[in-house]
Image (cartoon, grey):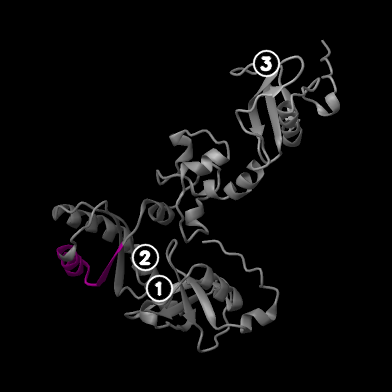
Amino acid sequence: MSTYDWLSDIPESLQSSDLVEVQFKNTRKGYYINSEKIELYKGDIVAVGSSIGHDIGQVTLTGKMAELAMKSHRYHPDKGEWMHVYRIARASDIERWEEAKRREEPTMIQARQIAAGLGLEMKIGDVEYQGDGNKAIFYYIADERVDFRQLIKDLAAAFHVRIEMKQIGARQEAGRIGGTGPCGRELCCATWMKNFVSVSTNAARFQDVSLNPQKLAGMCAKLKCCLNYEVDDYMEAGRRMPPRDAVLQTKDTDYHQFKADILAGRIAYSTDKHMAVNLETITARRANDIIAMNRRGEKPLSLLENDKAKTPERP
């Protein structure tokens, strides 16, 4: 999960807070207190406290940046108790951690078979073992409420670890599985996104994007999260654009809006309402001026600034 520490070149920021951000498998992160004042840097593998035993993860942020990230993610420790960084991981810790990770895929396959045998309407999408191998988190997707009390008993008997069931949505599952989006880059939910906000088709309408479900949907089959990235800029720029159905009247003919570049503030007008005929591209400001002139009963000679005639194209 990519992070950018824009305070890394300020030494004082490292000593300003004892908080450390630690990343585990995929999108799971936690915040811990470095009470032992261990000298930690981004990328260090550390052993941290857990509700049972200890976990192994990678340091992603330290100092003031970790504190700011925690506030941004609205993170609150379980039961109000802060866990601590124990130490930089030893070779034995890493060896046990690697062994636990190798057990995850076989565990997931067997867990799916157990759930199917119990007739549960759920999908186990991923399994994550704690660094010391004493606990396993089973991430599942379900449309309705699932009674998995018997499932927990069967999983505990099969794998001899403490079981935690965690329900996730389609977007969280895509983030845990990972992949490449249509933009050619790794999925945002698998790299830097932690909090998911709702995405509606209004975001596509504001950006003048075709409402094609196949193009608007991401790898999770939900609307792409990136539709929200620029929607505020488009909404602000759209306030300066003339109405889409406004007809610009000149002394020669009428013009209808054909297409618009919202961010650039430029609009192409056509003399035909349904086809690109005699296209003229003008600024939104010029279009608004012509609309104001038409309301006063005035008609310009042309759409161009200062009523300039369009330069004829050379054969």
Left or right of residue 190: residue 81: left
Q: Which of marks 3 and 1 is nearer the N terminus?
A: 1
- Disc 2 marks which residue? 101
Q: Nearer the viewer, residue 250 or 20?
A: 250
Q: What residue type is labelled 3?
A: Val
The nearer-to-camera label among 3 and 1 is 3
> Quick one: which residue is furthest to the front in this view?
296
Q: Mark 3 points at which residue?
A: 277
Residue nearer the viewer, 211 or 121: 211
The answer to whether residue 182 of the structure is visible from this angle is: no
Q: Is residue 165 left or right of residue 25?
A: left
| In the rendered image, the vertical position of residue 297 relative to residue 66, given as above or below | above
Element under disc 1: helix
Marks 3 and 2, how far apart at CA = 63 Å
Identify which residue is drawn at 56% across, 41% down: 206
Q: Residue at x 37, y 51 (%)?
A: 170
Q: Magenta residues, as a range?
A: 150-166
Specify whether residue 152 is painted magenta: yes
- Where is residue 301? Give x, y as percent: 81, 20
Q: Do the residues labelled 3 and 2 touch (CB within 8 Å)?
A: no
Residue 91 horizontal/vertical position (percent): 45, 77
Q: Residue 95 carries which label?
A: 1
